[in-house]
Amino acid sequence: MSSALSVCHINLARGFRGGERQTELLIQNLALLGVKQCLVIRDHSPLYEHLKDTPNLEIIKLRKVLDLRFNGHLKVGSRFDFLQAHEARATQWAFLHHLIYKTPFVTTRRVPESVRDNTFNRQIYSKASAVVAISNAIAHTLEQQFKRPIETIPSACAHFLVDKEKAQAIKLKFKDNFVIGHIGALVDRHKGQSVILKAAASLVDKIPNLKVVFLGSGSDEALLKEQASKLNLEDKVVFTGFVNNVVDYIGSFDVFAYPSNYEGLGSVLLDVMEQKVPIIATNVDGIPDLIKDGKTGILIEKQDDRALAQGILKLKEDQDFKVKLIENAFLLAKDLSPENMAKAYLKLYQKLKP
């Protein structure tokens, strides 16, 4: 499959989180489909190292002078059929570029909160050629707010490659433990890690070899360590800090717990599904698009540590149920591949092209 389309992507995030991973996956897979591409990023963006060797991709770095949204427009000019914005500041950049060069733009919304209601944003979302949501919950919010059709294209699993040597070493480290794993920024108001700690404290007597492994770093690391200490879980909880290749750890998890308080979709769930680990997650925002209760995982209400503990015991004791969830989830992850995501975006661009 090939395409004569050309697309300029914009992602002005400082770090590298789920949205940047999805930007990377989309660009790499559109390249395989023959799309000529450009990527506008801020100077020192981690995306450069991730994508610098991608064929047929031009990368433009912006240095902040007053306001980043006003930089780089001359370099891009009118050379591309579409602009694709991947986060909020990028959407503003794309809108300003559209005003100057009339290039059509598509924006992808990855977070469940409503867009700030002001004249500028109403103009942006009315002028976009298409607005893409990564989950049905986000699409519904945008439809209600802007009274326009919204495309839904889910995020994709990352097809992470396992370092077999490292993965085996990690498995040996935890071979005598029942491991509850979690991946995400250590920001409790978002990811709800304190719920995992409360559930673990209630399970210690029933699962003496229990171990909780947190992959990630964040502003609440000290608070979560303090909570673990107060719950007498010091020897039961492992904080790994930021890990480059999380998939090396996933195979060591017996259960993946994801008690987020809000979540656009939770693309990391797809990576866990691909590694055949059962999931318990909260019934919030986009998560139910992936976790169908009793089919691809277990859904609980947010802040419900009792339900989380009960779900963990269910997965430990009912192997047939666990295997059913794993198999169904694996099939879903296989369908939500980077290749299929890129094909969906390409189909959208082709539909929009004059």
Image (tube, rainbow, N blue to C red):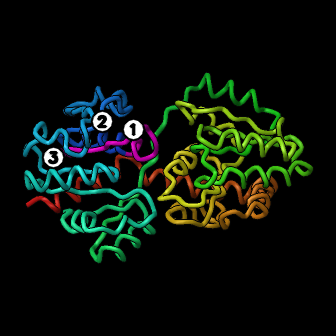
Q: Is residue 211 above or below residue 170?
A: below
Q: Is residue 334 above or below residue 283?
A: above
CB under 8 Å between discs 3 and 2: no
- In this view, the mark in front (3 or 2): 2
Question: In this rendering, would 18 be left or right of 31?
Answer: right
Residue at the front extreme?
66
Residue under circle 1?
14
Foreground of the two, 36 or 238: 238
Measured in 3D between alpha carbons, the distance from the residue under mark 2 to the one under mark 1, in whole angstroms, is 7 Å
Label 1: element kind: loop
Give, as a three-letter code, the residue at label 2: Arg
- In this view, the mark in front (3 or 1): 1
- In the image, residue 204 lies at what x, y percent? 88, 48
Give, as a three-letter code, the residue at label 1: Arg
Residue under circle 3?
3
Measured in 3D between alpha carbons, the distance from the residue under mark 3 to the one under mark 1, in whole angstroms, is 31 Å
Label 2: element kind: strand
Quarter of the image that includes the C terminus: bottom left
Measured in 3D between alpha carbons, the distance from the residue under mark 3 to the one under mark 2, in whole angstroms, is 28 Å
Counting residues from the start of the chain, the first of labels 3 and 2 encountered is 3
Q: Is residue 170 magenta?
A: no
Foreground of the two, 271 or 305: 305
Q: Residue 216 bears which disc, if any?
A: none
Q: Is residue 18 magenta?
A: yes
Q: Dot 1 surroundings within 10 Å: few (below 14), some, or many (20 or more)? A: some
- In the image, residue 343 lies at what x, y percent? 28, 52
Give, as a three-letter code, the residue at label 3: Ser
Residue at (20, 38) in percent of width and height: 38
What segment carries the magenta color? 1-22
Give residue 349's quadrant in the image: bottom left
